[in-house]
């Protein structure tokens, strides 16, 4: 008798071997019922390990000046069309203060890459001020700060950490050396990016990484390796989304871009499998998901994501931080984004965790710290599907 997909999935969860061939077969799933089983199991795993709360990080894209020339990126150095900007200190600090007042527990400071002294000095100073001015009764330690400012030296990572940033997101973009080399100029090395991820961990950051999904020429074997890479690095947070072309990028034209449905399906499966495999890490439902599907982030949440990064970049520069075409929320004020988010998150039976940092439960467990499941005061209405319960119980009983 043929083994049903649910039995197959239960076996994979029970064995916890995460063989590459199993990952490849999960990524190759086409049958909608099987994909639904995967989704339901991932959602149940999330609820079990992290609770139903969604953690917000207000996204402040504070500068698009960049010394890198990543072939896929709309703000790469070689793009002479984009208007360059750097927010003033006041604009950055006001955006963070706005987040704290709204109850967003954390902010992400993201920018193009610069490694000069002035850049790091300013960032260090801004982090200090943000930590100071966002203290309140509800947030005695100020907002949590995630940095996403690329490859820096150990000393600079240390300075940024000491200033008060405690999380760092540095996407590997792909774990394949070959594909990495095809996407970046020779001056940007795979080994340095990998070394940075290790250094960040040693310095004490809660570390996130991620990949782009559906890059021209990328195979599902490479995506399976990406998942294994996350596990091998014992990463705390994941941010990944579909690759989206940008008109002024410099990608080689010879390889076709997989169609939108293919990229989105793969992105959701990657989120679901990452949740099942890594259990208690934080996983973002990224903006790129929403760029290709108006409810892409909500669907990401249903596949086990638990972090959303609402836009709070001041409107007058937002259009200049287009990493890819069709970036959503270019016209909506941060206030509009906030109202819209509550409804969106509610629509998938989840709730926003206001005021807490929303750290990765994985990091807490690894460091023997209390795991902040900090549930919302109101009882949440979410009831995971029967099949998910069955699969997850099978697995958790082991
Ligand atoms: N300079 C920082 C921030 C980079 S922008 C750093 O290097 O970490 C944040 C992320 O946007 C990148 O890591 C990349 O994964 C994503 N991105 C860039 N161009 C993209 C594209 N065309 N499609 C999808 N994601 C893209």
Image (tube, rainbow, N blue to C red):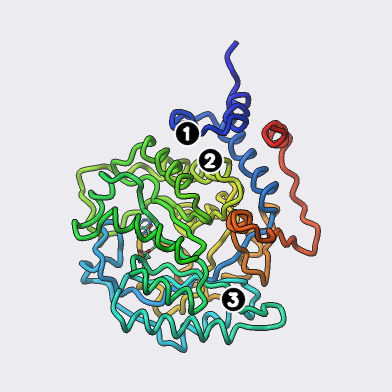
Q: Mark 1 points at which residue?
A: 23
Q: What's the CA distance linking mark 3 and mark 2?
A: 30 Å
SS assignment at label 3: loop
Q: Which mark is residue 143?
A: 3
The image position of residue 297, as x and y in percent, is: 54, 55
Q: Residue at x 37, y 54 (%)?
A: 172
Q: Which of 94 and 50 is in front in this view?
A: 50
Q: 261 above or below 63?
A: above
The answer to whether the residue labelled 2 contacts the one labelled 1, judged by CB atoms less than 8 Å apart, is yes
Q: Can residue 294 be seen in this view?
A: no
Labels 2 and 1: the sequence-earlier one: 1
* Residue 86 shows in the view: yes
Q: Residue furthest top?
A: 1
Q: First in sequence: mark 3 or mark 2? A: 3
Q: Where is residue 274 in the image (x, y as percent from the top left)?
A: 52, 44
The residue carrying mark 2 has its beta carbon less than 8 Å from ligand 1: no
Q: Where 27 falls versus 76 (above or below)?
A: above
Q: Mark 2 points at which residue?
A: 273
The secondary element bearing badge 2 is classed as helix
Q: Residue at x 63, y 54 (%)?
A: 365
Relative to 2, does residue 63 appear above or below in the rendering? below
Question: Which quarter shows the C terminus?
Answer: top right
């Amino acid at each position: 008798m043929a083994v049903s997909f649910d039995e197959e999935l239960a076996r994979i969860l029970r064995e916890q071997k995460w063989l590459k061939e199993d990952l490849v077969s999960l990524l190759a799933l086409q049958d909608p019922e099987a994909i639904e089983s995967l989704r339901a199991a991932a959602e149940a795993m999330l609820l079990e390990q992290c609770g139903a709360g969604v953690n917000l990080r207000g996204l402040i894209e504070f500068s698009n000046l960049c010394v890198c020339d990543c072939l896929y990126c709309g703000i790469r150095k070689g793009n002479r069309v984009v208007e360059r900007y750097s927010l003033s200190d006041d604009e950055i600090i006001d955006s963070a203060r706005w987040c704290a007042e709204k109850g967003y527990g954390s902010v992400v400071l993201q920018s193009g890459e610069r490694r000069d002294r002035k850049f790091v000095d300013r960032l260090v100073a801004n982090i200090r001020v943000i930590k100071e001015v966002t203290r309140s009764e509800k947030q005695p330690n100020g907002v949590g700060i995630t940095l996403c400012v690329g490859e820096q030296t150990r000393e600079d990572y240390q300075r940024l950490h000491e200033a008060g940033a405690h999380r760092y997101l540095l996407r590997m973009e792909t774990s394949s050396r070959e594909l990495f080399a095809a996407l970046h100029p020779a001056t940007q090395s795979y080994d340095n990016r990998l070394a940075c991820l290790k250094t960040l961990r040693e310095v004490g950051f809660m570390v996130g990484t991620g990949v782009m999904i559906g890059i021209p020429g990328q195979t599902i074997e490479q995506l399976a390796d990406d998942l294994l890479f996350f596990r091998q690095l014992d990463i705390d947070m994941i941010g990944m989304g579909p690759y989206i072309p940008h008109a002024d990028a410099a990608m080689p034209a010879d390889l076709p871009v997989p169609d939108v449905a293919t990229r989105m399906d793969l992105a959701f499966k990657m989120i679901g499998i990452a949740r099942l495999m890594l259990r208690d890490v934080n996983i973002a439902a990224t903006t790129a998901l929403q760029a290709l599907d108006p409810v892409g982030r909500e669907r990401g949440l249903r596949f086990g994501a638990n972090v959303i990064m609402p836009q709070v970049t001041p409107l007058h520069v937002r259009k200049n931080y287009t990493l890819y075409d069709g970036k959503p929320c270019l016209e909506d004020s941060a206030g509009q984004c906030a109202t819209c988010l509550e409804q969106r998150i509610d629509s998938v039976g989840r709730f926003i965790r206001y005021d807490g940092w929303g750290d990765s439960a994985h990091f807490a467990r690894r460091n023997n710290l209390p795991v902040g499941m900090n549930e919302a005061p109101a009882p949440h209405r979410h009831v995971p599907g029967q099949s998910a319960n069955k699969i997850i119980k099978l697995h958790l009983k082991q």
